[in-house]
Structures are given as structure tokens and as C-alpha cells.
């Protein structure tokens, strides 16, 4: 795909940021978000923690169960977001990413008012990530349906996401597009190309190892998307019965996924995206992740 004028400007800004020592890399890889220890880090989503606990107690519990980070969601109140981020860091489980999504106002929608809403929401999510101390905002890049064709979704979503990159660079928060059940980017080769065409380290990949289980293999996606990946979601799925399961209870080939992660040098957060539970459930879940990590 030909590089647009806006893309050239973004690329020059990125090059200047790299030269200034921001610590980012080219479109085919990124060191941003990698753990200083060079190892895989266990995380859970904030909504999985017991709802009856105060926020500070939730973070303490997450740490006690064995987690090392939290994925949260955008917050409208900047002061409250900063306070929550501080609480998470004090407990030793920093908020590392925000799960924004984007299903409600897709950036692929043909209606200008919907796209404007979506752009405003992503901008707010980026600012909230900065407030909370998160490095990454998860984005569903597009939605294909009977009204929005595949080609339209591809070009329109890229054009609109490019509008967000200057703010992402200013805030130093990465937009990470995820593979979801949106009838879009169904091949890891296409997914990698989609990311590369932005030519920006502020647009990366968030891979969910359970979301492609019906039409592909997680280890293949990890190897193909490779160093574009800045975050991993952990889920498991059983084809027979068509149901989500606990980690290690489904059809994800975890030894091969772990091997693929080692091959691409991934060393950052792996966040569980499952239903919540009590301390015993969460502790068991952290131990299951330990078993996956030990397969490497």
C-alpha cells in the first residue's frame, strides 16, 4: 500500500522520537512494554477481582494471589485515574494496559458521527492510560458486517487510526489492535501487514491466544505477528462443545504457544481474560499461568 502524506509525517515524528532515545523500534518490532527483567509477567483484569473489596484491597489481593500487573479500563475522572494508578503501583501490581475495545463506535463505521464518537473515546482512553500509568490501550480496529465491507473496514479504520497516532506519540501510550471475532484480519499474515502499514511504533499488536482457536493456531499467530506484539491475552477454548474454559482445560496448545513466545523474545504481560472469582480461584489461575511459563 502506498504511504500517505500523513503517514510520512508520522514516520518522521517517530524517527525523531527514536533518535531522542524514547526507546522504540521500527515497524517490524518494538522493545516498548518489555519487562526490565526480560521475563513473562502474570496479570489479570481488574474486573476479575472480588467486587465487594475496596480498590486498594483488590490490588493487594491480586499481588497476594501471584499476579504482577492489572489491566483496567478507561476512566472519565482524571484525578481518580491517577489515584487508582498510584494505588496499583503501591501494591506492586501496576496497571499496565487499558482494555478500551471499540465495538460501540467502530472506526470502520461509514457514519461520520459514529467515527467522531469513536475517535473521541480512543483519545479519552489514551489520556486515561497516561493518568493510570498504563503503556497500552487495546483497540478493536474495525468491524465487518453486512453494512461495512472488508475493504471499506480496512481502509477506513487505518485512515482513522492514523489520526490518533500523534496523540499516542505525545502521551507515549501505544495503541494495540487485537484479534477478535469481528470478521476482520482473519490471517496472521494480513494482521502483520495491517500493523506494518502504519509505520509507527505507537501502533502495535495485542494477541489473544484463544480468539483464533476456531480458525487457526495460536502458536502460528504468535510466530507470524512476532515482535509487533506488545501484549498477550490468555484464554482457552474447547472446540467440542464450543465453549470457553479455564486455562489448560481447552484446546490451546500451550507448550507450542510458550515455545513461540520464546522464539520471538516476548517478555511482557500475559493478562488473563476470564470470569472473576475469590482468592482461591485467582491463586489457582496464577499457578496455571506459572505452569504455562514453565513450559518454555
Image (cartoon, rainbow, N blue to C red):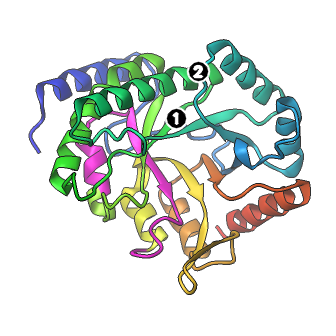
Q: Is residue 29 left or right of residue 3?
A: right
Extreme residue in the bottom direction: 240
Task: Please tell me how many numbered marks the rendered image carries.
Answer: 2
Q: Is residue 211 magenta?
A: yes
Q: Which residues are magenta?
A: 191-216
Q: Is residue 222 left or right of residue 57?
A: left
Q: Is residue 192 left or right of residue 231?
A: left
Closer to us: 23 or 45: 45
Q: Residue at x 71, y 48 (%)?
A: 44
Between tags 1 and 2, which lies in front? 2
Question: Residue 104: x percent and y percent?
Answer: 42, 41
| Residue hosting label 1 | 136
Extreme residue in the top direction: 79
Q: Is residue 241 above or below residue 172?
A: below
Q: Are marks 1 and 2 in contact (CB under 8 Å)?
A: no
Q: Residues within 10 Å of mark 1 (few under 14, many from 20)?
A: many
Q: Is residue 24 above or below residue 109?
A: above
| Residue hosting label 2 | 76
Query: Considering the numbered disc 2 on the image, is that residue within a helix, a strand or a loop?
Result: loop
Amino acid at each position: 500500500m502506498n504511504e500517505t502524506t500523513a503517514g510520512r509525517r508520522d514516520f518522521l515524528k517517530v524517527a525523531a522520537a527514536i533518535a531522542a532515545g524514547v526507546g522504540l523500534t521500527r515497524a517490524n518490532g518494538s522493545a516498548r512494554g518489555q519487562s526490565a527483567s526480560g521475563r513473562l509477567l502474570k496479570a489479570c483484569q481488574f474486573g476479575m477481582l472480588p467486587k465487594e473489596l475496596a480498590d486498594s484491597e483488590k490490588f493487594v489481593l491480586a499481588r497476594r494471589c501471584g499476579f504482577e500487573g492489572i489491566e483496567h479500563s478507561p476512566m472519565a475522572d482524571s484525578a481518580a485515574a491517577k489515584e487508582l494508578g498510584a494505588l496499583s503501583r503501591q501494591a506492586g501490581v501496576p496497571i499496565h494496559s487499558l482494555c478500551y475495545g471499540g465495538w460501540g463506535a467502530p472506526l470502520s463505521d461509514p457514519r461520520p458521527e459514529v467515527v467522531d464518537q469513536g475517535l473521541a473515546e480512543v483519545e479519552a482512553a489514551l489520556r486515561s492510560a497516561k493518568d493510570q500509568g498504563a503503556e497500552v490501550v487495546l483497540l478493536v480496529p474495525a468491524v465487518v458486517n453486512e453494512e461495512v465491507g472488508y475493504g471499506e473496514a480496512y481502509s477506513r479504520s487505518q485512515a482513522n487510526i492514523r489520526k490518533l497516532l500523534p496523540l499516542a506519540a505525545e502521551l507515549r501510550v501505544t495503541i494495540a489492535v487485537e484479534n477478535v471475532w469481528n470478521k476482520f484480519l482473519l490471517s496472521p499474515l494480513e494482521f502483520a501487514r495491517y500493523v506494518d502499514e502504519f509505520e509507527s511504533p505507537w501502533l502495535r499488536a495485542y494477541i489473544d491466544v484463544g480468539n483464533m482457536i476456531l480458525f487457526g493456531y495460536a502458536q502460528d499467530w504468535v510466530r507470524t505477528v512476532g515482535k509487533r506484539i506488545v501484549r498477550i491475552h490468555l484464554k482457552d477454548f474447547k472446540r467440542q462443545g464450543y465453549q470457553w474454559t479455564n486455562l489448560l482445560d481447552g484446546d490451546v496448545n500451550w507448550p507450542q504457544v510458550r515455545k513461540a513466545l520464546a522464539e520471538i523474545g516476548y517478555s511482557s504481560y500475559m493478562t488473563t481474560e476470564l470470569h472473576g472469582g475469590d482468592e482461591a480461584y485467582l491463586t489457582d489461575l496464577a499457578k496455571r499461568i506459572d505452569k504455562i511459563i514453565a513450559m518454555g
